[in-house]
Amino acid sequence: MRFHHPRLRWKQGNHLTLLENGVELFPAMCDAFDKATTSIHLETYIYRLDETGINILRHLALAVERGVKVRVVIDGFGSADQDLEIQARFEAVGVKCRIYRPEPRSFEIFNFNLLRLRRLHRKICIVDSRIAFVGGINIENDFIPDAIDDPRFDYAVRVTGPVVPDIVHAVDLLWLRLAWMIPIEGAGRSQKDLITDSVEDLTNGSGDTKNGKSRWRHLHFRRRLHYPDHVKQTGNSNAALVLRDNLRYRSTIESSYLKAIRTARNDIIIANAYFLPGHRIRRALCDAVKRGVRVRLLLQGKIEYHLQYHATRWIYDYFLHSGIEIYEYLPSYLHAKVAVIDNTAIVGSANLDPFSLFLAREANLITDDASFARTLKLSLENAITHGSRIIEHSLYDSRGWFKRLLDAAAYRLLRFGVSLSGKGNDQEY
């Protein structure tokens, strides 16, 4: 059942395909790249120049050779170890590449700046303004060295139909705004040149390029620069793009989760790589159990980042006492950011933690397509049954004092970090 939310623009007539892990996403993206005729836009938090990254680069280079305009945005922290090399490799083959908030160089890295915490965490790809990929999968090899047989566990969605222009609009706005953020000292180009080039990218040369004033008229950021007058329906799914930023959509992802949880009647499954929600979501999940809703959490069992892992375990007791089932995924790193709440499915880049909910740019796709939700639910239940351990309350209570101290210290340290960001009171963490 579709729920109403003031920030959600539900669009009917979409076709959604669930893609599990990079093994399904990357071939689907490359196939779309090979068939592209006008434009490709890719945004990602992490881009690695490993086998996967090189393969994506190769397909994008072939698209450029056919005359396709290609843009790439990578995050300056997520891709910090290779960001300049990645940018150079892309630009060498004709791909325009921008870095979102590049990390400071040299000794400047020791300067504390809260803006460095605001990252581009969303993962979006758009081809010809008609096919979009939205999810949580970064551009890097799926397999990790110590889990050869099992890839990172994550999801994305391939979508066509009327919701795609909303996704196009979101990436167009960021591309324009990035032009204001690019350092231009010594580059020999003015900020106006960068903005003008950005407008030409977005309009595909359709504007009056001889008239500077005409170009600048496109800088009304709320205007849908690449919005078709009519988009054909390609399926039967209702879907909406859910964004999170630090301006217009500060709490949209969190409030959409709350709305779905509070209206749940039967079943809730949430799979999160990093799960540390505020009190409102915690209470909503516990209240759902009181209404007779079965609530299951699929969380990390294989530790990737110790601080987040132990901070999350500190709040296990709260959920277990309320009757919520907790499972930890063991075969490899759980990187998923998805949920199935009755017939509503959510797939995207946002974890339910302070980083995603308060600081990062995120993008989720939400749908009330019962068939799609059932497919995602079956996949999650398979992971729960065949790759996870249940957290028994009795065993959790019997853990040693050192583990308890470690969990508590991690939770307090993370809370302190959230308070430094100025967001500590938003959800009473």
Image (cartoon, rainbow, N blue to C red):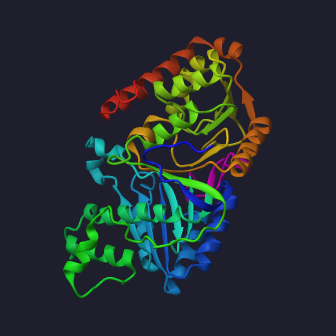
Closer-to-camera residue (30/332): 30
Residue 60, image quadrant: bottom right
**Position of residue 62 in the picture relative to residue 120 (left or right):** right
Against 1, residue 201 (above or below) is below
Against 309, residue 111 (above or below) is below
Q: Residue at x 54, y 81 (%)?
A: 63
Q: Residue at x 43, y 78 (%)?
A: 92
Q: Percent position (x, y) of residue 407? A: 53, 21
Membership of 138 in magenta stretch = yes
Residue 226, image quadrant: bottom left
Q: Residue at x 34, y 46 (%)?
A: 246
- Quarter of the image with the N terminus is top right
Q: Would you say residue 46 is visible in this rendering?
A: no
Residue 81, image quadrant: bottom left
Q: Which residues are magenta?
A: 136-156
Closer-to-camera residue (362/112): 362
- Quarter of the image with the C terminus is top left
Q: Percent position (x, y) of residue 71? A: 44, 71
Membership of 356 in magenta stretch = no
Q: Percent position (x, y) of residue 194? A: 27, 73
